[in-house]
Amino acid sequence: MIRHPLLQVGVTIGLLVAVVALLDVDAVVTQLSDYHPGWFVVGVAVSLPQLALCAWRWRFTAARLGETLGMRKALSEYYLSTLLNQVLPTGIAGDALRVTRQGGQMDGGLRPALRSVILERASGQLALSLWALAAVPLWLGSSATAAVLGALACLGAALLLFLRSGQTGANDSLGSAARRALLADGALGTQLLVSSAVVLTFLIQFYCASRAVGLVLEPAVLLKIVPPVLLYMAVPLSVAGWGMREAASAAMFALAGWRPEQGVAVSVCYGVVTLVGSTPGLLVWASGRR
């Protein structure tokens, strides 16, 4: 139990040290010094609709599993969860707290709360993966469009096959819960629409972070860079994505024809934007202590 967080701290420090050793730190600092606070504030403000959409997605997912979750409760718990995920090594401590706090109020206890959180996060990762897949033609040219469309068709067929598969095993299995929450009776369209809107807020925040450090990224560049970087951040090997995000941003910016130092500067600003955007979770924590 102790080694895993320590491993994440070590990976974070190691990746940041590698970024510092391999890149021109002075160039990163120079880019960060070209600071435009207005864009930073806008990026933080985008956290409001972003977390509201995430909370609504969690509420929708829980409802599909037969559990009632009020929007106000979902939003406050999501803020606290996001804050803890930003500052604690495990990266899932906030989600675990969501499960614990909400499970005590659900009729079925921790099990439906755990499933609603897992499936709500799965909805977000599915949409993010589709955005990253959709950006492949931008990297490879128009010749890759047919291959990407084919991959999307295969993914859609797999989802439909899963949906139509027999309801074998226990009715309360995770597979059955996934079908109800993510796939059955039109849920997939709603989940992808809301989760895609969340991904769009990530793109906007990344754009604001780039403008805050004096760069202007075109929409096509954002679409090429941001989804892969966010997918790297989702790998639970660092603290809140720090280190992973900077290394991935440096690589993706270089591949897109920009300087890797610019990618690191934008990444650092983006990380601070998301951290500040989660600080209302402190109010939820303080309210709970009272």
Image (cartoon, rainbow, N blue to C red):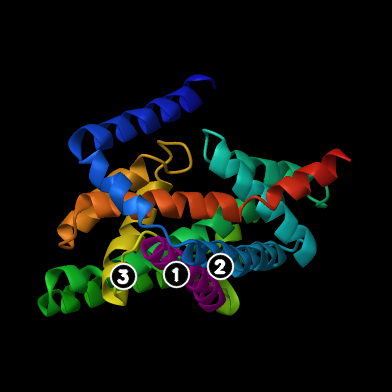
Question: Mark 1 belongs to which amino acid?
Answer: Ile
According to the picture, the residue beneath numbered tag 1 turns out to be: 204
Q: Is residue 104 visible?
A: yes
Is 233 left, or right, of 112 in this rendering? left
Mark 2 or mark 1, earlier in chain:
2
Picture layout, residue 1 above or below residue 107 = above
For marks 2 and 1, give the CA distance.
8 Å
- Does the segment drawn in magenta span residue 135? no
Q: Which residue is mark 2?
A: 46
Position of residue 283 measured from the top left corner of the image (x, y, whole percent): 76, 49
Q: Is residue 37 left or right of residue 11?
A: right
The residue shown at (25%, 77%) is 149
Label 2 to label 3: alpha-carbon separation: 18 Å
> Where residue 216 is drawn, which disc sits there?
3
| Front in this rendered view, residue 278 or 55 | 278
Label 1 CA crowd tier, 10 Å (few <14, some 14–19, many 20+): some
Residue 92 in view, yes or no: no
Point out the stretch of residues depicted in magenta.
188-212
Question: Can residue 204 be found in the magenta stretch?
Answer: yes
> Element at badge 2?
loop
Seen from the viewer's position, the closer of residues 175 and 195 is 195
> Are discs 3 and 1 less than 8 Å apart at CB?
no
Q: Amino acid at mark 3?
A: Val
Which secondary structure class fits the magenta region best? helix
Report x, y in % for residue 70.
79, 64
> Residue 145 bears which disc, if any?
none
Q: Nearer the viewer, mark 3 or mark 1?
A: 3
Which element is circle 1 on?
A: helix
**Residue 82: x %, y % from top left:** 60, 49
